[in-house]
Image: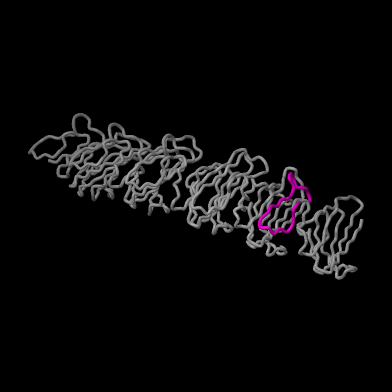
Amino acid sequence: MFCSWIIAPGRPVTLTFTSFQLDMGDHVVVHTCSEATCSQPRELVADLRMRLGEDEWQFFVASGYMKVTFTSDDIWVDRGFYAVWTPPLEAPEPCSGCRGCGRLTNNSGFLSDGNHQFYPGFSFCSWIIAPGRPVTLTFTSFSMPASDDENYVQVYSCSDATCASSTRLAVLGGRFENLRWRNEWQHTVETGYMKVTFTGWSSYSRYSGFTAVWNLSLDSEALPCRGCSQCRTSTNTSGSLSGSFGDYLSDNLGLCSWIIAPGSPLMLTFTSMRTTEEVGFVDLLTCSDATCVNSTTVAVLSGTLSGDEWQYSVTTGYMKVTFSAGYSSASSWFSAVWNLTSDAPLPCIGCSGCGRFTQDSGFLSDGPGSLRRSAFCSWIIAPGRPVTLTFTSFWIESGDYVRVYTCSEAACSHPRELAALGGQRLAGENWQHNVSLGYMKVTVAARSGGRQSLSGFSAIWNLTSDTPLLCIGCSGCGRFTGTSGALSDGPGPYEHRAFCSWIIVPGRPVTLTFTSFWTDGGDYVQVYSCIESTCASPKPMAVLSDTLRDNEWQHTIVTGYMKITFSSDFTGRRNGFSAVWNLSSEAPQPCAGCSGCGSFTDDSGFLSDGPDIYDRNAFCSWII
């Protein structure tokens, strides 16, 4: 077969193919001509075979004279082709295998491949969206083969309504549960002119193609909301948002977006979240304005939250939240609230009694029972005067942490970490934390996994001047103003992870005399000198461990203010220590393991280490 057409309107003309499917040996040839008879075709425009490429569906001939020929061999036949010619400005968009293609100037509308079940092969379709104002395209469903160079959607930005000059923005294909292309569900073109093309050479019964809507970029309806409700742009200073997807086992994926735009610094606080790892995601973006056309990713969250993932601050005052889920046998959900940063609640996931406190003293804990998995909770303590946090119990799993921060102001907007406490139980001075500025933040974070749920923690806070002395694992701790007295870790071997304190403040030079001492190598008694009765700034004078040397049995503090602490680790333990204190003028001689020590002015007398075999670690003294 050989057929020929001459198209000669004498003015610029556009040839548009609307369908094309030839056998291997057959082809269509397009030439330009210099005059109406086309006796000598001037330029080969195209030699088209089998199926058309993306740029072969439409041809513009400026001379106004065109010749088209079709040649087929004698072997096989196929469906053939169909084409129309029009003036360039009236040229239709290619629409082979689709419905509703064309040039669309409305401010909003709907487009799709036009097939309710699956798209046919050899499809090529094109839409020009030209409202003339910034426009956003939002896909509401998308199902094509993954990693396929024959089936895809392309999005272009154009400079004018003809889209003769365009810039490709995206090439989209595949199933979105495997490809992390969630940000490609939505495309904005500031020029107001957009082109969308669909290429579907191969037909698959299990792929349903795509659907999409377009809106002016400032319209809240431009936000995708597949699988959720009330997706919108909100300018309120506070509110809530949530999403929940069931078991997605079909081609219909879930995608929802919200823009939060109060225009002032804001805080997003999650109240719950659980998605299937690497299938369900919550994306947080900070934006430069309410359109969120220009945005920067703050976080991509999946699975369960931990640590500081429960709260996010956006100083620009504009935030976009996107929730997406792919194919999974499990449900995905989240919920959150937003507030202006100055009014934001503290996260309290899995605890009770979180909040901001300005009182001089109080109590906090993770709550009754075991510390909950994936818990994240915060407290701000802001009396505005030097404050001390004292733990009264602590037992958390390794990998979970309680963190203590110091802050420069009551909002604690820029906290500085003082301690990260974990590893089941506390040791040493970790039981107590001082913040001289008067503003403190405390957080607890538990992992989502773990083999056990331990009892958590509890603590009290007081003004530093009123803070009780730590007495974990000892007895008789306290503040003493008397001129003499006794102290010890308590009867029998001391406990693991003990931490105990004593302050002795007679206000006159005082001497501490040990009467027994035996600790494990990792356990310590420390003696401090203070300049006032609170011992707020103690100066270390001695660090004592194991057994004492000759000059370590007695310690004199001339200021009259002394602090003693005892700490033990979780390894070995011994009998501990005991001591007495006296005014220095009345201090006894050391007499550890002996009897009859003292000061003597008699002209004659008797002394010894005592009856029978002397003790280990003895140290005794006599003055004659």
Residue 619 coordinates in the image, percent (x, y):
22, 38
Q: Quadrant of the N terminus?
A: bottom right
Q: Who is closer to the viewer here, 239 or 186?
A: 239
- Place of residue 55 in the rendered image (x, y in percent of width and height, measured from the top left): 76, 59
Residue at the outermost top position: 612
Q: Residue at x 8, y 37 (%)?
A: 604
The one of 272 and 572 positioned closer to us in this rendering: 272
Q: Is 118 within the magenta?
A: yes
Q: Which residues are magenta?
A: 99-122
Residue 558 located left or right of residue 2 = left
Q: Which residue occupies 19% across, 45% down?
A: 506
Q: Is residue 386 above or below residue 363?
A: below
> Which image quarter: residue 7?
bottom right
The answer to whether residue 428 is visible is no
Q: Is residue 402 above or below residue 32?
A: above
The percent position of residue 221, horizontal first and vertical second, equals 61, 52
* Residue 11 visible here: yes
In this image, 537 relative to 241: left or right?
A: left
Left or right? Give the position of 88 relative to 546: right
Query: Main SS of the magenta segment?
Result: loop
Query: Quadrant location of the C terminus?
Result: top left
Q: Quadrant of residue 164?
A: bottom right
